[in-house]
Image (tube, rainbow, N blue to C red):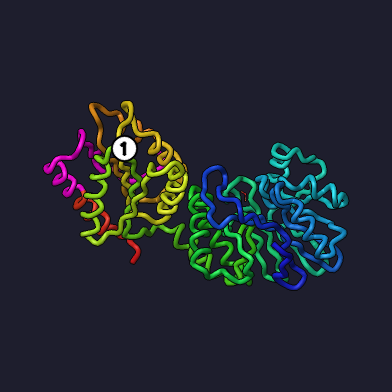
Amino acid sequence: MPVLAIADGVFEVGAAHPERQLFDCLMPTPYGTTYNSYLVLGKEKTALIDAVDPEKISVLLKNLRDAGVDHIDYLVCLHTEQDHSGGNAELLRRFPQAEVVATTKVRDLLATHVHQDPAKVRVFAEGEKLDLGGRTLEFMPIPFAHWPDNTMVWLEEEKILFSTDLFGSHYSTNKAFSTSSSQLQLAAKSYYAEIMMPFRSHIAKYTAKARSLQPRMIAPAHGPVWYDPELILSKYEQWTGDSVKKRISIPYVSMHDSTRSMVEHLTIKLSQRGISVICHDLGSAPESLTIETGHFINDLVDAAAVVFAVPTLLGGPHPAAVYAAVSASAMKPKAPYLGLIGSYGWGSRMPEVMEGLLTGFKSERLPVFQVKGLPTESELEALTEYADNLADKVLALPNLAR
Ligand code: FEO
């Protein structure tokens, strides 16, 4: 990623990582990602906002050379996670005079996570400003977006909000102005789902704070700068709100097609009621579990219901469903309804085990629907009733988005 001027005296100097296809050993990143680092030139002082992932520190150092930077006064650390702070040590070896500035939370976590000496960190509290000479960076902590230490800084003179992970996207592109692309919108939604959704009420508050500043642009720690902040602010308002879509997500596993036949029947019956259904086959191919679970988690941003379709293996739920359930539950989805269906061979503790894994869902539970072996005609009729009952509930939701 080359040096990119985003405003007068403000440059994006971070690194792209297009080949990275998985984040946190969990989240599929088909468009790669970027680790954004911003250079802000004041009349007297120069600040660098965040370093990059240690794997890409050489790119940041090259970009700083290309930008003619031979002196940095401040390294402003907005968040400790290593994709931003992991390159600090090498950066500070190259620019030893740079003073690290951060909130107390970032300072404390830098000490434990990258062994940075806390005595050498200058602490800024909420509302305090770092004066660069004609340019000031105001500190705005946003705890739990998504770590306790996340901090935004506001460059009042240019009306730029440096938003740390908030409003980010795992999206690597050479195109400077691409913020309205549908790919980026999907990447931003996926990023929200897996990083921000578990903290939905906090994120709603921070989105309102960001809007109240009326930023000219929002510069996150991942993905492109939002040159039209309305694009991402309006999406975040929608995602963090209570409304859901007329959509049901069905993650499923099927070893011998019995559970699959239930999924197919349910899908057809729900579709006939005008409800869109997204099915995720968690076991279709060796690598499908991580990828399909990632897509499933994206559905959780605005699905009206989730129905896990789970066969029984060795008396309990199939392990692929366990992986998806644990991952989804951690995201604290807002889906109003949750169901469990599936086929078993001779006995099953699937419902009890799954229920114990799904505590992050505060959803109303539908009655468990299990069959022994291949569903019979009368069991499929009962499943039609199940579908109708679920469709009635979804269509009656007061917060159903059009
Ligand atoms: Fe991009 Fe929370 O690190």
Q: How many marks?
A: 1
Q: Residue furthest left?
A: 378
Q: Quadrant of residue 68?
A: bottom right
Is residue 70 at all visible to an observer of this figure?
yes
Q: Quadrant of residue 156?
A: bottom right
Answer yes or no: disc 1 within 8 Å of ligand 1: no
Q: Position of residue 109 (x, y in %)?
A: 69, 41
Residue drawn where x is 48% and y is 62% of the image: 237
Question: Which contiguous range is marked in magenta?
Answer: 359-386
Is residue 329 at all visible to an observer of this figure?
no
Give the amino acid type for the residue marked by disc 1 in the picture.
Met
* Left or right, residue 30 beside residue 224: left
Q: Position of residue 166 (x, y in %)?
A: 58, 56
* Left or right, residue 21 beside residue 347: right
Crowding at mark 1 (Cα within 10 Å: few <14, some 14-19, many 20+): some
Residue drawn where x is 25% and y is 38% of the image: 368
* Left or right, residue 126 beside residue 243: right
Residue behind mark 1: 255
